[in-house]
Image (cartoon, rainbow, N blue to C red):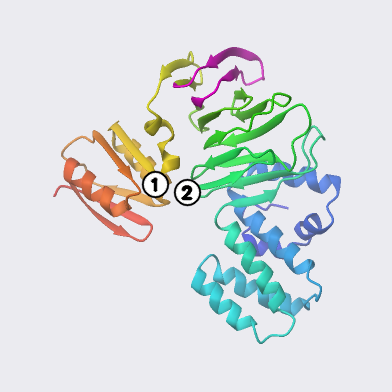
Amino acid sequence: MDYKNYDTEHFIRDEEFKRWVKSPSQEDQEFWQHWLVCHPEKRGDVALARELIMSISHQNETPSDSDSEEVLHHILKAGNNENDRFFLWKYLEPKKGLLAVAAAIGLLLASIFLFGDFMVGEAADGISKTMLVKENPQGIKSQFKLPDGTHVWLNSGSRVVYPESFASGHRSVELHGEAFFDVVKDKSRPFQVKSGNVTTTALGTSFNIRQNGIAQKVKVSLATGKVKVDGFSEDNELRNTHYLAPGQELSFHEGQVPQLTEFNWEESYGWKDGIILFKNANRDDVVETLESWYGISIEIQGKTEVPWNVTARFKDQSLENIMENISFTVGFDFVLDGKKLLIKSGK
């Protein structure tokens, strides 16, 4: 079955998918775990479909197939809009046997659309029963705690994969994107973050990791404590090991020698405190940052008369205020329409 073109509604109605959700076999678990790794863009649809199916299945008063279809239709139509969910509630309130289902799913939607939290199957080493995923879409940042109490700030467009409970002897998570970790100290269980071909190991410390999977770049910035950073080849051969002290940042770029430098904390992880810091940023850097930060798409028409060389600091500012500032410095007009931003050359 080709699931690449499936959305949430397709998954809900697929019998093989429903079988995996309700009573998965080992073969089902292996298939979907592998499929989700290969198609990360579908994690949101899969997460929502799983939760909707499980919520309806777990109700004491199971609705008929036609009632279930009705609930799913209106919930999927409502999406993550608060007003739409209110009207959905009022719509279902007089329908006997459906209100409990709507209540449970309403709560699930509130969390799912903030950031993903769902199972991806058994761990490969068989030690952990369930692997969980926290995933943010573009424009959304979140905070949460791992099973050991470690505090995680997850940037937009990023995800963390971790076990439901850490095994004795080690704590290991996988990062795609960017996150700041404030690690709970536990000498008997080192804490590891795997990001691409780089593994960062700590006991009790705080650090930021940013991974750019497309460009094969990983940057580890140490705030407190001490960490060991190992760089591996594509075939998992250890290439180098570095130990960082607070204030040091190690940058990996595929095919290049790792670079150890000092860093500005606002530039490296000020994002978790609502700070956007541009330092001699060109047009592409500014566009990439703003698209990720605000979850928008930016289109540029023509060429600006002045090259972009933006140095600025913004804290908890609206996109419109930031664009007013940058447009004055660089010299362009812009139109903001919902989630689309159009930049026009020349004032």
The spot of residue 116 in percent (x, y) is 61, 51
Q: Is residue 306 left or right of residue 270?
A: left
The spot of residue 64 in percent (x, y) is 78, 78
Q: Which residues are magenta?
A: 222-247
Q: Is residue 245 left or right of residue 132?
A: left
Q: Main secondary structure of the magenta part?
A: strand
- Badge 1 density bin: few <14, some 14–19, many ≥20, Cα 10 Å: some
- Residue at x-position 37% and y-position 41%: 275
The vertical placement of 257 against 33, above or below, is: above
Q: Nearer the viewer, residue 238 or 346?
A: 238
Q: Is residue 63 a member of the stretch shown in magenta?
A: no
Q: Which residue is mark 1?
A: 291
Q: Which residue is mark 2?
A: 138
Residue placed farthest to the left in the image? 347
The vertical placement of 173 against 335, above or below, is: above
Q: Nearer the viewer, residue 311 or 2?
A: 311
Could you tell me the amino acid type at mark 2? Gln
The spot of residue 189 in percent (x, y) is 72, 27
Specify whether residue 221 is in view.
no
- Residue at x-position 23% and y-position 44%: 326
Could you tell me the amino acid type at mark 1? Glu
CA–CA distance between discs 1 and 2? Answer: 8 Å
- Residue at x-position 64% and y-position 83%: 93
CB of mark 1 within 8 Å of CB of mark 2? yes
